[in-house]
Image (cartoon, grey):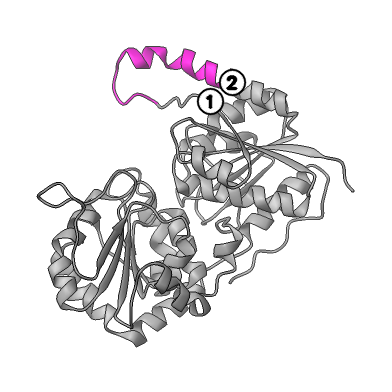
Amino acid sequence: MTDAFAVVVAGGGTAGHITPMIAIADALRQADPDAAVTAVGTADGLETRLVPEAGYELRTIAKVPMPRRPSVDLLKLPFRFLSAVKAAGTILDDTHARAVLGVGGYVCTPVYLAARKRKLPIFIHEANARAGLANRVGARYAAGVGAAFSGTGLPGAKVVGMPMRGFVATMDRAAQRDAAREALGFTGDAPALVVTGGSSGAASINATIAASLPLLARAGVQVLHITGRGKAVLDTAGKPLAAAGYRQVEYVDSMDQAYAAADLIVARSGAGTVCELAVAGTPSVLVPLPIGNGEQRLNAADLVAAGGALLVEDAQFTTSYLANTLLPLLADKEALAAMGAAAKTQGKTDAAAVMAAMIRQGLGRTTPPPTTTGS
């Protein structure tokens, strides 16, 4: 039995940060049952639910975003940031952390700086094709950096894929299809369309789907619409929109069921979604977020180039697009099968294990990380 060691993992806000963080924590525990893993997040993100559900302790620090314009908040920023660094340091001291893993987001920069002050090794996983600010800061001091995509610009980054929990990484879409369709309310053999804007939802996608329900119904398409938390689609009476063959939910805990049940998925091209679609081998139409630094378009590039997905700009995702492109694709089983096979060639299933091995090797506890493999 090896001696116990403690690792602090940091990240939060959206499922795109939390899911890979938990996957790496799981892989650390699997490789080293004596590993004590503590997560650091904020008090208002999805981590407050997802981290405890996964069996890990969550400690929180204040979120310190950069104000978008000159204000009193901007003047307070240095004091708030220093307070967050101090709080992160307290957590590192309390847990006797020997290493820090960060996956990006507001919470990570204070943790990275607190770890550097204590001369703890920092490990980073970057989910997006274009690295965020926190990971660009942390990578300057990192002992190891993994990335889901190439071209992040982070020094020394190794492309490992997206860490994902075992029930997604090992899923068999064909074997799970019937049970997943039943669980998600799909009936018979009518085409099944799943629409998701991610855990935060996508108002523009939601609006187009709502406007297209008559079109989808006439085509005999069944729709599961994952609207995002707090983004239920309402009718003129203020009630959740209802229609034949249409079901909406705000969130789905087991996205592997959605990937297995769907003949086609419409989604934002968040890094986690793109990588999970590849591992699952599910055909998709990707609608990059039209704001930000363009990382979602970059996230989608390899999957689209391989033929596993179509890309459409947010402004072009309209009822006309559904009529002229999406519905003909849904009716073409051979084209969907070819897209699914192409998507599968882009999947990497062992990223969580590779990141866990990187951390353990950095602490002198294991052999070099395994070579990444496809699905």
Look at the picture and state if 345 lies above or below 13.
Answer: below
Pointer 1: what residue? 61
Most foreground residue, 18 or 141: 18
The percent coordinates of residue 265 (x first, y second) are 35, 67
Q: Quadrant of the C terminus?
A: bottom right
Q: Residues within 10 Å of mark 2 (few under 14, many from 20)?
A: some
Look at the picture and state if 172 lies above or below 207.
Answer: below
Residue range highlighted in magenta: 66-86
* Quarter assignment of residue 185: bottom left
Q: Residues within 10 Å of mark 1 (few under 14, many from 20)?
A: many
* Quarter assignment of residue 205: bottom left
The residue at the far bottom in this view is: 334
The percent coordinates of residue 345 (x first, y second) are 52, 74
Most foreground residue, 252 or 344: 252
In the rendered structure, does residue 316 fall within the stretch colored magenta? no
Q: Are marks 1 and 2 in contact (CB under 8 Å)?
A: yes
Q: Amino acid at mark 1?
A: Ile
